[in-house]
Image (tube, rainbow, N blue to C red):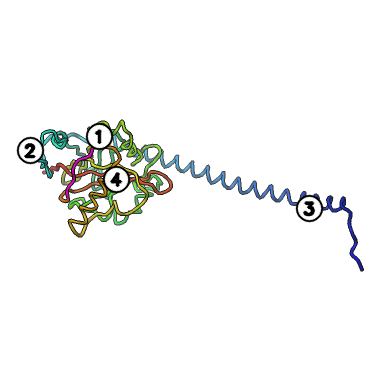
Amino acid sequence: MTSPSITREEYRKAKNKRKKRLRPWAFYTFLIIFLSILTYSIYQVYTWSLDNKHTKELTKELADDIKPIKNDSEGELVNPPKEDDKENDYWYYTSLPFYEVDFTKLKEKNSDTIAFIHMFETNINYPVVQTNNNEYYLSRSYDKTKNAAGWVFMDYRNNIDNLSDNTVIYGHGRLDKTVFGSLKNALNKSWQNNKDNYIIWLSTEKENMMFQIFSIYTIEKESYYIETNFKTTKDKETWLNTMQSRNQGIKTTTVSTSDKILTLSTCENAYGGRIVVQAKLIKRQIKE
């Protein structure tokens, strides 16, 4: 028995009929996927906006309540150059006043507060917190509420009362320039051309400190630059040479293995890039 044959026209009509049956399903599948992506994107933008709003409100509240004050009292010079090296910027920077804040008020707001950081020509004017890991404040604000903007925090391996070879402070690189979002200013030539910007002030309950920047650069995500202590002097020397060699354009200064280093780190992009600013301790003042 032979199977019935169909004409070319009948085959074409049957094929078109199948296509018509499939088209609504394809359309609705595409529509569901599109609406899901759109809904998720709107939700992400909405929560991002809420997080930014909360961070800005909290930052303003802190700025109104906790104002850094200048302290012109003398301090201890750290690793000064030779006295006859009068042209060294070190002498200019160490003539500047310290900045300090009322830690009693800060501790009342958040008991994890261990320092206050201040940096010219940026929005970096924040209390610094620390806990027993480096994850908590990636997604918590200063008031410890859930917030993708996070807060400015010190590496859990560091001790603010006994500085490591390298003290590391982190913050998200937010597009609205809150937290460490304005650290990218340091990559601009206009910022780098003003030597007054090359100082970072760090105040704690026990002392005020002044750091002179020696290296600014971008790099892919790695762990070498955030090493906190070194087993040998040679290891630290190699590390310092590497950090200095990465410097992108600023007028640098000499660094030695006896220097205490401060590293500020933030994300440059969504692909793991980092913006890094590194400075050495040049002056400190013990609080009475």
Q: Disc 2 or 4, which lies upstream in sequence?
A: 2
**Looking at the image, do the residues carrying marks 3 and 1 touch, with CB atoms under 8 Å apart?**
no
The residue carrying pointer 1 sits among few (fewer than 14), some (14 to 19) or many (20 or more) residues within 10 Å by Cα, namely: some
SS at badge 3: helix
Q: Is residue 155 above or below residue 4?
A: above
- Residue at figure coordinates x 18%, y 59% from the top left: 232
Which quarter of the picture shows residue 72?
top left
Cα separation, mark 4 vs mark 3, equals 63 Å
Please report the bounds of the magenta region as a residue range: 250-256
Q: Residue furthest right?
A: 1
Q: Is residue 87 above or below residue 133?
A: above
Query: Disc 2 or disc 4, which is closer to the eye?
Result: 4
Q: Position of residue 181 (x, y in %)?
A: 36, 40
Q: Which mark is residue 246?
A: 4
The residue carrying pointer 4 sits among few (fewer than 14), some (14 to 19) or many (20 or more) residues within 10 Å by Cα, namely: some
Which quarter of the picture shows residue 128?
top left
Q: Is residue 141 visible?
A: no
- Residue at figure coordinates x 89%, y 64% from the top left: 3
Q: Amino acid at mark 3?
A: Arg
Which quarter of the picture shows residue 175?
top left
Residue occupied by mark 3: 18
Q: Position of residue 7 (x, y in %)?
A: 89, 54
Q: Position of residue 16 (x, y in %)?
A: 80, 49
Judged left or right of residue 187, residue 100 is left
Residue occupied by mark 1: 197
Query: Disc 2 or disc 3, which is closer to the eye?
Result: 2
Q: Amino acid at mark 2?
A: Glu
Q: Amino acid at mark 1?
A: Asn
Q: Disc 2 or 1, which lies upstream in sequence?
A: 2
